[in-house]
Amino acid sequence: MSDQSDAAQPTDDDARQASSLAAERASIASQGASDYVRRVFEDTTSKARSVLGHKDRIFCCRCHVYFFSGEDVDQESVDQESEGFVLVATGSEDKTVRLWRGSLGSRKFKLLHELQAHQEECLSVEWSPDGCTLASCGADNKVVFWSIDPAQIGSVVPAITCTLRHRDHVYRAIFAPVGLAGLEEEVDGEDLVVTCCGSQILFWSTAVAAGAGGDSGQGEGDNEGKLLFSKTLDLRGKAFGGVRNPDKLVDIFDIAVAEDRVAAACSDGTVRVLKFSRVQVVEHVIGLFQSPVTCLRFMSDVNQSLVGNDLVVCCKDGGSHLVDVERSLMAEKPATRRSWWAHQESVYACTPVPGTSKLMTCSRDCAVKLWDMGLDVGEGETEEVGSAPHLLGCFNKKDYPFHSADFAIVPTSEGGGITLGGALLVAAGGQSGMFGTPWFYFWAGKV
């Protein structure tokens, strides 16, 4: 029997306190994120630091910020100079997931764990909202869930809690609110996870938050979750892949989740939007775009909630678009608020900075860029539809295609309260080489 049954269980008061603290941190982060993200991009070339991350290309990097009072965390987990710290997860072509810890005090990163569960390359990683679960997606047709104990992350190796098996490679997994598809009763307090695999979008119920058994750092978990339903998309545009796609199937490269919908980036140059009711799933098509859609994200509002209307759509030809979803669905064609050539080659990832109008994009053209997506329209004026956003900053690295980038605001304690401590940008990609593949990071502290 597991020792977990003897452990103290969280009370309702603990949950309310944690919820209140999480809301406070989110408010603090949104208040200063806009200024901090610009400062991170100022003179990135001279501030760039690198970590020799993996043996081959790095396909994804994701940050999660943690904040504890001094008695709640071991000294292996958090730097003594700062109570706020960041865990960075990276997934690579070398089939591993690696966990790194960084803090404002040291402004350095330390490798904590190398996690091995995939038989093929790891294509993406994703944190759960509470930072206690990490999902890794592989070309071996699996999504693996790892249990994270942030208070003991330096000494406790993450364990596999669940494995979701698919029929094809899995590009992405997202933790979604259980009310997204009206599945509250079927999920029953567990996590709802949305994945994309080949031409399918799949919805899963999984007890990853319950700490189901599994091996530490490697192997297979004994919980395989429950497939609730799936949606198969058919070809609506030009088939992508040539001889590698003889059946002319559509491939889903990315998905994004908002309050009541799921958007999918498709290889046929379309965006599919799934909207849900109690009795059916309705599929809408936005397109055609001029080339395959490689990635997309919903822009958040000032309260960091994903309202599901403004959607950033990026393509293989380097083009990017800010799409008004509701207008697009009514017009049955893309209703773009902005369209511009963000990069010279394929855009691999786009990342909105929560609570701001800022967007990061990274590309095969070896650049990470920061854009201001805001539409400044005065009273009595009209939006200038189709205009390019303002480029705020750019980081270039020769012969280093960027596959992923992420941004985090790190809090700290000051005067008995929580305040902004600094900001972090991480960027990863690269090419396979004899000495391995690095990833890059930039810190911006207080003025």
Image (cartoon, rainbow, N blue to C red):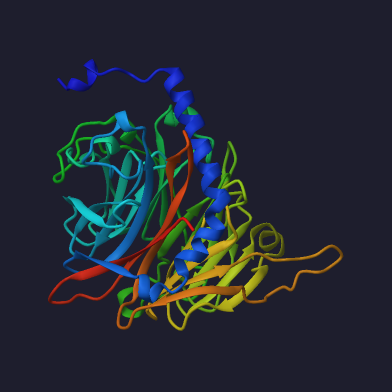
Q: Nearer the viewer, residue 4 or 139?
A: 4
**Residue drawn at the location 22% of the way across and 16% of the way down:** 6
Q: Quadrant of the N terminus?
A: top left
**Residue drawn at the location 42% of the way across and 77% of the way down:** 346
Q: Most extreme residue toward the right, as rendered?
A: 380
**Residue 396 screen position, x and y as percent:** 39, 79
For residue 19, side relative to residue 337 (left or right): left
Looking at the picture, does residue 167 appear above or below residue 80?
A: below
Q: Quadrant of residue 222?
A: top left
**Residue drawn at the location 54% of the way across and 67% of the way down:** 313
**Residue 237 screen position, x and y as percent:** 51, 73
Q: Nearer the viewer, residue 391 or 314?
A: 391
Q: Nearer the viewer, residue 193 or 422?
A: 422
**Residue drawn at the location 56% of the way across and 58% of the way down:** 34
- The number of numbered badges drawn on the structure is 0
**Residue 429 screen position, x and y as percent:** 30, 70
Residue 324 appears in the rendering: yes
Residue 294 appears in the rendering: no
Looking at the picture, does residue 198 appear above or below residue 166?
A: below
Looking at the picture, does residue 8 appear above or below residue 91?
A: above
For residue 387, side relative to residue 143 (left or right): right
Q: Most extreme residue toward the front, as rendered?
A: 415
**Residue 197 screen position, x and y as percent:** 36, 56
Q: Nearer the viewer, residue 109 or 219?
A: 109
